[in-house]
Image: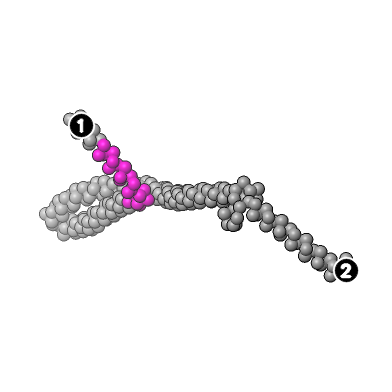
Amino acid sequence: MGLFSRMETVVKSKMNKLMDRMEDPRETLDYSYEKQLEMLQDVKRGVAEVATSKKRLQLQRSKLQQNLEKLDSQARDAIKADREDLARLALERKTTLNTQIQGLDQQIEDLEKEQEKLVAAEKRLSTKVEVFRTKKETIKAQYSAAEAQVKINESVSGISEEMADVGLAIERAENKTENMKARASALDELIDTGTLDDLTSSGDDIDRELAKINSATTVDLELEKLKKEAGK
């Protein structure tokens, strides 16, 4: 049981991380706002239904009141006509209507109170929804800005890493170039001093020295020739 419990914990942890990466808080906020709007619409419909029911009862009471006045008039006319039986019948019906009107008045009063409660609830909920909407848009804007900043920083970080690699490559190339120059200079010096034989030239060191002497003699002869021609 301990192993399975740990496995379940690990799976839940992995799923939570996966859901966290997949969830966009902006979409969650918009969904919550839509749900609150639906609740607000339900309250408004409730207010409308109560107001409609109250209006129906008021119309019904108005009709009963008209009948009540008619019965009262009929009772008076019956008395004038010496028809006490008709007057009594009219008064009995009038009493029944009065009872019905009193019942309607109580229902209308109850609906009026219910309507006032719903209207107050609607105003409170409407205020909360508006506050949530403002906060929602603020959070969404902040999240979008943070998301853009993260992308920019990631791009800059990637560029910095690439530039660092380029810098290292350039540094290595410069070091190799300097080493190659130093090696070439050292080889030239060794060749000039005779420490290192110049494989590109023929003969040994004696031949090279004789070649130098011959070259110097040739130069001297040419110089004397130019002096004679110039009269010096």
Based on the displayed image, in which of its 4 quarters is residue 200 positioned? bottom right
Give amino acid for label 2: Gly
SS assignment for the magenta stretch, majority = helix
Residue 4 is left or right of residue 177, and the answer is left
Please give the name of the residue rendered at 28% of the width and 52% of the height, measured from the top-left corner: 42
The answer to whether residue 44 is visible is: no
Please give the name of the residue rendered at 16% of the width and 58% of the height, measured from the top-left corner: 78
Q: CA distance from mark 1 to mark 2?
A: 117 Å
Q: How many marks?
A: 2
The C terminus: image quadrant: bottom right
Please give the name of the residue rendered at 65% of the width and 52% of the height, measured from the top-left corner: 206
Residue 105 x %, y %:
25, 49
Q: Which residues are magenta?
A: 10-32
Residue 102 x %, y %:
22, 48
Please tell me the numbered disc located at residue 191. none
Residue ID for mark 1: 3
| Label 2: element kind | loop
Q: Nearer the viewer, residue 188 or 175?
A: 188
| Label 1: element kind | helix
Q: Nearer the viewer, residue 161 or 35?
A: 161
Based on the displayed image, in which of its 4 quarters is residue 60 positioned? bottom left
Q: Is residue 61 above or below residue 229?
A: above
Give amino acid for label 1: Leu
The answer to whether residue 85 is visible is: yes
Residue 212 x %, y %:
69, 56
Please give the name of the residue rendered at 20% of the width and 57% of the height, measured from the top-left corner: 67
Residue ID for mark 2: 231
Is 28 contained in the magenta span? yes
Looking at the image, is mark 1 or mark 2 earlier in the sequence?
A: 1
Residue 166 is left or right of residue 189, and the answer is left
